[in-house]
Image (cartoon, grey):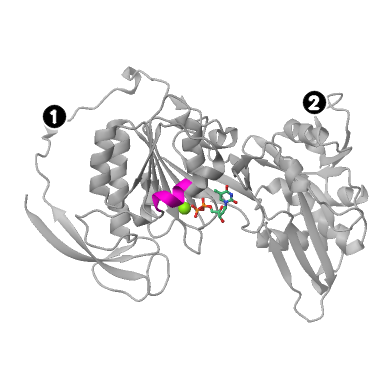
Amino acid sequence: MAKTKKTIYFCQNCGFESSKWMGQCPACKEWNTFAEEIVDKRELKGRKEVKDVQTTILKDITSSSEERISTHMEELDRVLGGGIVKGSLVLVGGDPGIGKSTLLLQVCKNLSGEDLNLLYISGEESLQQIKIRADRMGEFSDRLALLCETNLDLIKSVIEREKPDIVVIDSIQTMFNEQVSSAPGSVSQVRESTSILMQIAKGLGITVFVVGHVTKEGVVAGPRVLEHMVDTVLYFEGDRHASYRVLRGVKNRFGSTDEIGVFEMRANGLKEVTNPSEFMLDGRPEGASGSVVACSMEGTRPILIEIQALVSRSAFGMPRRTSVGVDYNRVNLLMAVLEKRLHIPLGDYDAYVNIAGGVRMNEPAIDLGLVLAIYSSFKDIIIEESTICFGEVGLSGEVRSVNMIEQRINEAQKLGFKKVILPRVSMKNLEGKFDIELIGVDNIKDAVDTI
Ligand code: TYD
Ligand code: MG
């Protein structure tokens, strides 16, 4: 096989490729991220002739429903789209110490009780360290094998020999293969390692879980390319100081991506949180202005969250605005709507908006909650504790309809709320279905009059 060696510079942040060194990456605009890597280009041998390549009629393909394996963790199964798909490659990303290794070891524990062989490969921890972690979780069956190794060529041979059903690679940044001369964790190493793992997954029908570290920007370290190659990308996130963790699907070839799973980190591993609303609302202040409960849909599941706002007179000419857990621009926009439509002088006031519990919510349905929280803090009015609200707010102050109304109301009813403030346009066909007070509003004027 003819070999040619070539030097290429890669941006270690986004994977941009360049033939010469550059100070700033033209793709992601980061400075000083280029590193030299040597890439072997092999000539392709045994190329197929065009006469060997055939197209297929879509109608003629018989669909086989893909096999799903349950992880016995409902929260994880849901994010995966109903369980593990045989032969898929799943990337689990997250900050260091968030619990990626713990999660995957726990998956191994659950699955090792079944008729499945598992192989956990760690490039970060020793067998002793893994054992200490496993001891906290309880009994494991003898179906789980461990391997401490970072050489991917060896790992590939071991997998071919042992033929496990599920493999965990902890983490992709520690793996290297000999054909690539750059350091572990570099773009070409990670890319090459992932494609080897892809071959293992697709070729042998083995499900591979891969742990990936994230950079300070929150993407999987180094290569964005990694995300394109794998079937499923999950992010494990949460406040390090709080005990709960959220598992979010960012890409899923076998399911929807807006599902989340909620876990709590306990002394003996991760525990599923099946009622996240209760969890998020824990410790709500009583009789405080600027606090309201809103409902956001995360995938197919409604979650109730507390929105807090603090509006106070600005000491300087430039008012300060801060938002935690919601989009900053969205908060500014809603404040402008409030100022224009209700004629309240928010321009002279500082505003701080926070979603309690450290979660991030992006759904427009929490707009009405943001508006009410800001208004309540500005006027110092207490919103009844047993009230929840949802609805999107438009630029002319109208409250627009949102989807999945019934699920949201059900969740509120389940948690003992008495009153729901919702868009009037969404109130059709709701009569008599719920024994909870429903207050329909057309615009934010109506909404603030109800509190
Ligand atoms: P870990 O899975 O090692 O994180 P990652 O692989 O994402 O870097 O989790 C580390 C943290 O979890 C560590 O700070 C200790 C904590 N932990 C618990 O609180 N309970 C447990 O049962 C385990 C195993 C870990
Ligand atoms: Mg780890």
Q: Which residue is mark 1?
A: 52
Task: Look at label 2 and name its amino acid.
Answer: Asn
- Residue 29: where, in percent of width, then height? 42, 69
Relative to 351, 120 lies left or right: left
Assess disc 1: are there few (<14), some (14-19) or many (≥20) residues with their C-alpha within 10 Å of its C-alpha. few
- Residue 340: where, in percent of width, then height? 81, 62
Secondary structure of the residue carrying tag 1 is helix
Tell me which residue sits at (77%, 54%) in the image: 307
Residue in the foreground of this view, choosing between 33 and 247: 247
* Ligand 1 within 8 Å, label 2 CB: no
Q: Identify the magenta region.
A: 126-131
The outermost residue toward the bottom is 316
Task: Look at label 1 and name its amino acid.
Answer: Asp
- Residue 350: where, in percent of width, then height? 79, 71
**Residue 249: in sight, yes or no?**
no
**Residue 415: in sight, yes or no?**
yes
- Residue 62's disc is none
Q: Would you say residue 128 sits in the magenta stretch? A: yes
